[in-house]
Amino acid sequence: MAKQEDIFKNVVSHAKEYGFIFPSSEVYDGLSAVYDYAQNGVELKKNIREYWWKAMVQMNDNIVGLDAAILMHPTTWKASGHVDAFNDPLIDNKDSKRRYRADVLIEDYAEKLNQKAVKEIEKAKVRFGDAFNEAEFVATNARVVEYKAKERAILERMARSLGNEDLADVKALIEELEIACPESGSRNWTEVRQFNLMFGTKLGASADSAMDLYLRPETAQGIFVNFLNVQKSGRMKIPFGIAQTGKAFRNEIVARQFIFRMREFEQMEMQFFVRPGEEMKHYEFWKEARLKWHLSLGLGRENYRFHDHEKLAHYANAAADIEFNFPFGFKELEGIHSRTDFDLKAHEQYSGRKLQYFDAELNQNYVPYVVETSVGLDRMFLAVFATSLKEETLEDGSTRTVLKLPTVLAPTKAAVLPLVKKDGLPEIAHQIIADLRWDFNVAYDEKDAVGRRYRRQDALGTPFCITVDHQTVEDQTVTIRHRDTMKQDRVKITDLKSIIENEVSMKNWLMKM
Ligand code: ATP
């Protein structure tokens, strides 16, 4: 089996070679952790965004959209706590000069313990067969119990130390666990210190009158400051949600994982405003609802897991991540946070304006509580792209690279290929495209032998190839080839639309939720 690093390298190079993702400003050797979406990437990204928007906004009576500006009044970030507390603990290795997030080094160590426990469980599964009782094994097997207890103890201690701003203890923990620099193996560490992740910028022309601003580090605050505007103008009744997708910026300390951790990225967030005291019910609901949305894409249940937070952010009373099995292991894909009334109260305090809701049923004014779902669009892209990229050995022993994207997300739904560039076949192919493009993104390809064109479309993730041949001229039928099975059917041109529609429609995919 290919090594994890090789798989990941393959993902990055495939993304570039097939026009999905390029490094930003590559002619100047790129800009660290900033990427551009290319001709196919932009389509895949748009489709993921639309899949989210459809499920979150259009399919819910009580959720509406918003598109707030990236630049916001600077007091926003004072109120939200980002100026004072949006920090990551950083640590440098003195020998390799590599910089790391101290919490990530410790989390990775803890995850290794978890993986050891998982291995024991897998082994026992094989040994005991059908008689295996996993819960009992996990509770009683000495090794598993030890690994799990150690993992928990480490994470709890880290959460405590970070919570108490005890950075010396975070360093002590790294030393006690003998964590070495993954790059060099050295254990020669600096102290741990805090680093604010917000990008600063200036508004205004002259230096003395310019106002210090920040590029937003999350889209959520644009929703909070508009909460009452939306509620009043939309006559929204609690519980209701406001959703938005948009760019966010973080000056990440370590950014070496392609589009997993970027300095400029896109979030898809929904803030759900609820009655105080009812937030846990909604929190549980959204945890399940969001997992279901992910599962509807069919990337495999085993690739997702929940991780409940030990260390809660300054605004939260409960938080969980949906983690995904990326090519470098399980990492956060989406966060679901119960943010209490922290943000709205803080904005009331800093702005001097009331941000309250009158609940007619209770005949009472209150500041609503908020449950948030927040997923990174770029991380979704990586999850979908990396999991879909397959190297297959065919029956005749040859191999093919195929991007088995969920067809609803595929950048191009069908490619139309005239068998030869003459005898009127290109004209028919263009006519088919002219009909289909009203409903789907379709492509025309006449270069190279048909077999090679199939391979190229496989690598782009195109679910269907439609081949126009001499028989088409006679009877208005074409062959339609399915990406995943490579099966070919002879069908009428007039049936193409419904065949494609049936496979790629968002409705059919979301109905699986
Ligand atoms: P991490 O622990 O990985 O830094 P986070 O907990 O800071 O993430 P949140 O603030 O909860 O992330 O942001 C919500 C979502 O935004 C994350 O689940 C992730 O999908 C996405 N996200 C956050 N930071 C980045 C980034 N630097 N690059 C790409 N996506 C990001």
Image: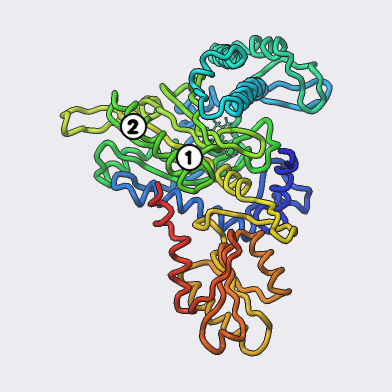
- Give the residue type at disc 1: Thr
For the N terminus, give its image quadrant.
Answer: top right
Q: Looking at the image, is 21 positioned above or below residue 259?
A: below
Position in image of residue 231 (x %, y %): 29, 41
For label 2, the residue is: 282
Left or right, 228 with respect to 172, comes to left
300 or 58, which lies in front? 300
Q: Residue at x 54, y 26 (%)?
A: 83
For label 1, the residue is: 219
Can residue 107 be seen by looking at this rendering? no
Can residue 300 be seen by looking at this rendering? yes
Q: Residue at x 54, y 45 (%)?
A: 299
Does dot 2 land on a helix, a strand or a loop? Answer: helix
Does dot 1 land on a helix, a strand or a loop? Answer: loop
Left or right, 239 with respect to 165, comes to left
Q: Residue at x 46, y 53 (%)?
A: 50
